Amino acid sequence: MRDYVNHAHNEYLQWWLEAGVPALVAMALAAVALALTARGLALRRAAQRADGVAALIALLAILAHSTVDYPLRTPALLAVAAALAGMAAAEAAGGSGRSQRRAIPA
């Protein structure tokens, strides 16, 4: 093999190398969205934020894995990350209301 291409083995660096400044802007916007989600979860009572915090921690684990590999280029892991982000954002925005839906005593 005459030609050899070495990848960054860091998803964020690879995005920057492939897409340039627009990728950096997109990553910064995603970081702001995650920070707002974490803030929204922190402002909720502990019993109301448990599901959202669990989803956020799982999402952060996938994003941490992106520093040494390319998990978000696998469609299944990308879908899981998107679902986790949606669940965390929904809980931060007000949640599903499960804690408010209680059986009415007869």
Image: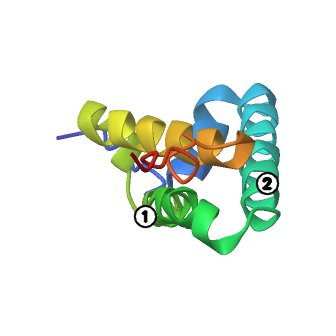
Tag 1 residue? 65
- Which badge, 1 or 2, comes first in the chain's sequence? 2
How many neighbours does mark 2 have within 10 angstroms: few (below 14), some (14-19), or many (20 or more)? some
Picture disc at residue 97? none
> Furthest residue to the front?
106
Q: Secondary structure at mark 2?
A: helix
Asked if labels 2 and 1 touch by Cβ distance under 8 angstroms, the answer is no
The dot on residue 40 is 2
Please state which of the two labelled residues, at mark 1 or mark 2, is closer to the viewer: 2
Measured as percent of width and height from the top left, residue 43 is found at 82, 63
Q: Position of residue 33 (x, y in %)?
A: 76, 43
> Which of 16/105 is in front?
105
Q: Which one is in front, 65 or 82? A: 82
Under mark 2, the amino acid is: Gly
| Quadrant position of the N terminus in the picture | top left
Direction from residue 29 to residue 73 in the image, left or right: left
How is the protein colored in the picture? rainbow
The residue carrying pointer 1 sits among few (fewer than 14), some (14 to 19) or many (20 or more) residues within 10 Å by Cα, namely some
- Image coordinates of residue 60 in percent, x first then y, are 53, 62
